[in-house]
Amino acid sequence: DQQVKQNSPSLSVQEGRISILNCDYTNSMFDYFLWYKKYPAEGPTFLISISSIKDKNEDGRFTVFLNKSAKHLSLHIVPSQPGDSAVYFCAAKYDAGNNRKLIWGLGTSLAVNP
Amino acid sequence: DARVTQTPRHKVTEMGQEVTMRCQPILGHNTVFWYRQTMMQGLELLAYFRNRAPLDDSGMPKDRFSAEMPDATLATLKIQPSEPRDSAVYFCASGPRLAENTGELFFGEGSRLTVL
């Protein structure tokens, strides 16, 4: 049972427009949510995160929104650039005793077309 | 420029052979993770170390996989014997102490394993 779901395997947008990547979760115990970006043949790199006590976090062109009642978060990229073309992973963290568990979605492949 | 270093980047081996993957975490990071990426399962956690002590290896097939940190600069993931279903990309990641609260990790470039 996937606790973190990215329902869109792929997304295509035009350069300069907004990209919106979505993520749904089921576990109310998650206390941090993260987005990672992955280029081919590279490891994921951290992009932006949000604490469960906030509803928005912004970093330059990237903004993450959290809707706890809907158990939904989204990543907005404005404006989108061709270099943003990558796979984006949503991840969520919860504490399990002495361990910190990070649960990952399957990713959304974003293509930004010039 | 601090980075997580993984070797080998690519490995092709035959079923039944032993495979060892190595990882050098970023100096000063106290947590180390091994992940496996497959198309169907995404990123699966195999092992998690804090201060070189194993904390969670519940996602790792114990009969053939083993993970160790012989010292703070080296983490190893071993598969013996390897099987075709082990073919995947294996990522090592490390994080500073604070990252345990926030989930921010630094990943290596991965080791692509193909078992024939």
Image (spheres, rainbow, N blue to C red):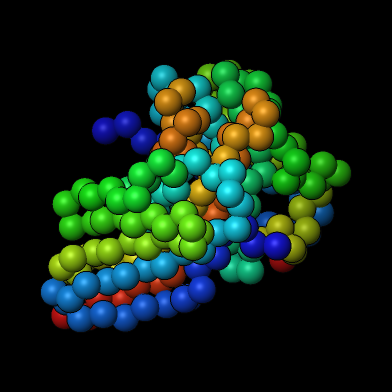
Q: Residue furthest front?
A: A69
**Is residue B37 at least partly visible in the picture?**
no
Q: Residue A79: percent from the left, percent from the top? A: 15, 68
Taking depth in this image into account, of B51 and B111 the one nearest to the observer is: B51
Q: Residue at x 53, y 19 (%)?
A: B72
Q: Is residue A97 left or right of residue B3?
A: right
Taking depth in this image into account, of A33 and A38 the one nearest to the observer is: A33
**Is residue A13 at least partly visible in the picture?**
yes
In which quadrant will I find the C terminus of chain B? bottom right
In which quadrant will I find the N terminus of chain B? top left
Q: Based on the displayed image, in which of its 4 quarters is residue A15 positioned? A: bottom left
Q: Is residue A74 left or right of residue B64?
A: left
Taking depth in this image into account, of A18 and B57 the one nearest to the observer is: A18
| Number of numbered discs overlaid on the protein picture | 0
Q: Based on the displayed image, in which of its 4 quarters is residue A19 positioned? A: bottom left
Q: Residue B10: percent from the left, percent from the top? A: 53, 54
Q: Residue at x 22, y 72 (%)?
A: A18
Q: Residue at x 60, y 58 (%)?
A: A26
As displayed, is residue A52 above or below residue A88? above
Q: Residue B17: percent from the left, percent from the top? A: 77, 50
As displayed, is residue A86 above or below residue A95? below
As displayed, is residue A6 above or below residue A41? below
Q: Residue at x 42, y 58 (%)?
A: A67
